[in-house]
Amino acid sequence: MEDQKKLSILRSQLSGITVKDIMTDDFPTIGPEDRVAEALSKMRDTGFQDIPIIENGNYLGMVSYGSILKKGSALPDTKVKNIVRNLPTVTMDTEVMKIAEHIVANNCRQLAVINGKKVIGVVSRKGLTKIAAGIKIFREIKVWEIMTTPVESVKEDAMLDDALEIMRRLDIMTVPVINSASVPVGIVGMKEIIDNHWKTEAKSFGDFKKSSKAQITVESVYTGDVRTIEWDDTLGSAASIMEDRGISTLPVVEGKDMVGVLTEFDIVELISACRERESLFVQLSGLDDEDKMYTDSMYADIETEMMKISKIYKPESLIIHVSRYNEDGGRKKYSLTGRLFIRGTIIDIKEVGWDLVKANSDLVKRMSQQVTEMKDSNVTFRKRKK
């Protein structure tokens, strides 16, 4: 997608797609006085992970797998109104690339389409993925160009709690499962977590590690018969597989080795990045409350490096996700993954460190350096990573 003419054509094609083309009017709803257990049951039965909350016919917000996961104290009997997620809404006139931007910025799967205060439909990552399967230029993009790499996975003999910890830390809902030879054999997701923990047991997610359910192995619950995609296959092929099989995650392989993962979110990110903007779209996610005090310093470093990059090429969007884990007696270590879209191509960088501000600064400096090196050597921005 380095060809600006192709990018312009793609924008034009996406602009011609309407909300009606991707919207479904068959969706679940729930009331604010209903219980979390009921919401989870509807999510499991319908496949929706963001469900509109309706009171007296009016839209109040969404209840999401993600918000339940983050609310460690939530119990099956917790009322939905206590975990309302105020996601953006869209109308029948909202452009598709803007919808993709909302989904990326909020890391959600569904958004409500409203008319006044009434919900008339839902748009989703799945609907946007279906678009990608049908657009000629998307069908020419290689999987390695937008896949996420490196990717975290769990072994078959790991505990279900290990998968849950990865989901919490990375703010994701599915994790690839690998065997002892590191070959992908399945996917474990929030559905398996819910099915094997929150049934009748009155425990919160925060208590999960103390539960006997935490000792269930991934091998006993994951979805097997995994479908993979080769690194040099096309995005169109991947999107068609996702649509045909009703799945959101494809491990990417080179031979038998897993070299990355491609998800509906990656495809939606690409659609979002196609949107023409007057200013750079920056999304900084994954910060917990105590880390948010560093956002001003982080954005200052981002601005400095993006200004350097803009003198070479105009950056279109930058997404940085922060995750953390404890090492050495509980001390927090940060892992940052950054994805820069520029001229329709992608630069992926990962940085790990004890100091959040420094790790962020190092990450964006490496992005700036890579853009400079690519320009000087007159080669493509992104090369396949093994």
Image (cartoon, rainbow, N blue to C red):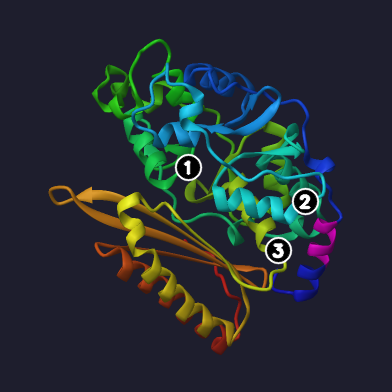
Disc 3 target residue = 274
Q: Which quarter of the rendering shows the N terminus?
A: bottom right
Q: According to the image, label 2 marks what residue?
A: 94
Q: Secondary structure beneath disc 2?
A: loop
Which residue is at 62% across, 34% downward? 247
Q: Is residue 362 magenta?
A: no
Judge by depth and name the residue closer to the eye, 64 or 186.
64
Q: Is residue 171 visible?
A: yes
User: Is any part of residue 179 visible from this angle?
Assistant: no
Going by the numbered disc 2, the residue's amino acid type is: Thr
Identify the image quadrant of residue 379: bottom right
Q: Nearer the viewer, residue 260 or 95?
A: 95
261 left or right of 123?
Answer: left
Name the residue: 58% across, 54% down. 231
Q: Earlier in the sequence, mark 1 or mark 2?
A: 2
Circle 3: residue type: Cys
Dominant secondary structure of the magenta stretch? Answer: helix
Residue 198: give x, y in percent of width and height: 41, 18
Give the residue at mark 1: 172
Q: Based on the displayed image, in which of its 4 quarters is residue 11 positioned?
A: bottom right
Range of the magenta residues? 9-15
Q: Are marks 2 and 3 in contact (CB under 8 Å)?
A: no
Image position of 196 (left or right of 334): right
Is residue 13 covered in magenta?
yes
Helix, strand or loop at label 1? It is loop
